[in-house]
Image (tube, grey):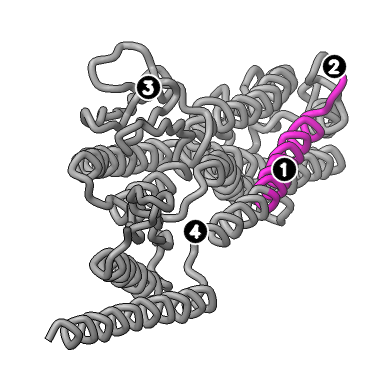
């Protein structure tokens, strides 16, 4: 049968359990503003019952464990959305720099300088004998060439800067995976010793949060509390250690490799994925189209100019108007820069003839690109439009994904975050339970005193 000692032991277990609960609640309140902290709670379980003649008699309560409140499904959702948001945001930043390099529309943009060149050629056709008109053609041609070179140089510089950014992000990733691996070892050890690893798990998951914005990650939880983190199918962090990643920029392509692997690791999302995609595909595509625009202009203008004559004595012919073959090296023929009288406007060598100048001015209207369906200006304007469209798409994706990510983070916070109101309610509940258990102890003490007096 139940004795006073049994009642006292039950009350004692209640006091101990409520002390754990009060301490845990106090810790939650203290960390209410700590980034990445997950609220903790004590799991109570009935102590093993004792058989009696009347049946099983409860023996109190046991604080079985103190653990954090965390919904892993929401973590996975946040990590899955973080890489998409990170990629879109980084793409928007890079493309905005491309847009600044192109500088359209503006008075200094390539479109305006092209118009200036064709207008200058039109002016030369009206006054083929005037040196001032020829000087203007040369000057406008130099502005066009400079615009091409500036755009090409700026995009090329941006592409080169991406290599440094990739290296920086790779270093950050390696640092994070190293920290995650170290924390996994500590978590596994703490769990094996029956200790609460909640604070360690919070720190690890915070590191994974940071990693997920840089690159798409796959996280698998293990039975011992540790996690295995993979990038592109390559395990990069676990309790057995971290795998170092390196980036190699060869052959105009950036690839990521894991230690001791000859096969590249697939990185298609996150901030790192955006850098790699822009370096490998997006920016080279823009440069290719810019070069095609410059090459078409160079080829057509040179062919026409070489067929005409200047007004020097004897009239010069066979000269190219531009040198170079792409946006990188386009320039006005230095012979023409030195002597604008050699600019060809005449088709027959006579001073007043303007046939070649008219033909060169009409290049503006010739559909000599995209299989004879697009003018040079239209082709370039399509390139500019595609950059603007890409920026809008990246911006919309970034905005939408940020809304999704924020919503998921709010949902996670509603589960794992500390609510001061809830904790205050818990404090009152645990305090009252502690007071009740204390009252039981006091009553048992009085009963013991009564028994002692009866014996005496």
Tell me residue 210's x, y (percent).
41, 48
Q: Residue at x 72, y 48 (%)?
A: 396
Q: Which residue is mark 4?
A: 416
Query: CA gap, disc 1 to disc 4?
Result: 34 Å
Tell me residue 10's x, y (percent).
31, 65
* Magenta extent: 373-400
The tag earlier along the polypeptide, 4 or 2, is: 2
Tell me the SS state at disc 4: helix
Of badges 1 and 3, nearer the viewer stands 3
Query: CA gap, disc 3 to disc 2?
Result: 48 Å
Of badges 4 and 3, nearer the viewer stands 4
Tell me residue 339's x, y (percent).
57, 38
Instruction: Name which quarter of the figure residue 361 lies in.
Output: top right
The tag earlier along the polypeptide, 1 or 4, is: 1
Tell me the SS state at disc 3: strand
Q: Between 396 and 251, which is closer to the camera in this rendering?
A: 396
The tag earlier along the polypeptide, 4 or 3, is: 3
Q: Which residue is mark 3?
A: 234
Q: Which residue is mark 2?
A: 372
Q: Residues within 10 Å of mark 2 (few under 14, many from 20)?
A: few
**How many circles with numbers are drawn on the protein?**
4
Are discs 3 and 2 less than 8 Å apart at CB?
Answer: no
Residue farthest along the top direction in this orientation: 262
Of badges 1 and 4, nearer the viewer stands 4
Q: Magenta: predominant secondary structure element?
A: helix
With 18 as the anchor, is 276 left or right in this view?
right
Name above or below for residue 2 compared with residue 226. below
Q: Which residue is mark 1?
A: 393
Instruction: Name which quarter of the figure residue 180 lies in.
Output: top left
Q: Between 340 and 234, which is closer to the camera in this rendering?
A: 234
């Amino acid at each position: 049968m139940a004795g006073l000692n049994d009642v006292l032991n039950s009350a004692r277990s209640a006091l101990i359990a409520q002390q754990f609960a009060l301490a845990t609640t106090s810790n939650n309140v203290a960390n209410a503003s700590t980034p990445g902290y997950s609220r903790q709670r004590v799991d109570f379980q009935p102590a093993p019952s004792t058989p009696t003649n009347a049946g099983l008699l409860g023996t109190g309560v046991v604080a079985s464990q103190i653990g954090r409140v965390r919904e892993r499904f929401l973590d996975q959702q946040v990590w899955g959305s973080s890489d998409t948001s990170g990629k879109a945001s980084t793409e928007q930043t890079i493309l905005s720099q491309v847009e600044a390099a192109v500088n359209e529309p503006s008075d200094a943009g390539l479109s305006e300088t092209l118009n200036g060149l064709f207008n200058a050629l039109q002016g030369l056709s009206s006054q083929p004998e005037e040196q001032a008109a020829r000087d203007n053609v040369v000057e406008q041609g130099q502005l066009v060439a400079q615009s091409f070179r500036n755009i090409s140089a700026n995009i090329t510089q941006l592409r080169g800067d991406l290599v440094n950014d990739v290296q920086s992000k790779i270093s950050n990733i390696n640092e994070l995976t190293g920290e995650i691996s170290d924390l996994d070892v500590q978590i596994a050890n703490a769990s094996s010793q029956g200790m609460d690893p909640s604070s360690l798990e919070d720190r690890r998951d915070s590191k994974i949060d940071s990693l997920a914005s840089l690159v798409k990650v796959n996280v698998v939880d293990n039975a011992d509390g540790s996690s295995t983190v993979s990038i592109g199918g390559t395990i990069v962090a676990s309790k057995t250690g971290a795998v170092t990643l390196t980036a190699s920029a060869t052959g105009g392509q950036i690839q990521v490799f894991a230690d001791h692997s000859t096969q590249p690791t697939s990185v298609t999302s996150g901030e790192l994925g955006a850098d790699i995609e822009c370096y490998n595909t997006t920016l080279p595509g823009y440069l290719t189209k810019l070069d095609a625009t410059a090459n078409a202009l160079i080829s057509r203008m040179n062919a026409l100019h070489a067929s005409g004559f200047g007004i020097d004595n004897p009239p010069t012919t066979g000269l190219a108007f531009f040198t170079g073959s792409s946006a990188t090296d386009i320039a006005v023929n230095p012979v023409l820069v030195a002597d604008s009288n050699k600019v060809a406007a005449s088709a027959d060598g006579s001073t007043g003839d303007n046939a070649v100048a008219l033909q060169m001015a009409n290049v503006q209207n010739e559909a000599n690109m995209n299989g004879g369906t697009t003018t040079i200006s239209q082709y370039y304007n399509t390139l500019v439009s595609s950059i603007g469209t890409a920026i809008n798409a990246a911006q919309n994706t970034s905005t939408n994904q940020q809304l999704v990510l924020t919503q998921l983070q709010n949902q996670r916070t509603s589960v794992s975050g500390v609510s001061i109101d809830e904790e205050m309610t818990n404090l009152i509940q645990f305090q009252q339970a502690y007071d009740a258990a204390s009252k039981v102890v006091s009553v048992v003490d009085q009963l013991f005193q009564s028994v002692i007096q009866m014996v005496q």
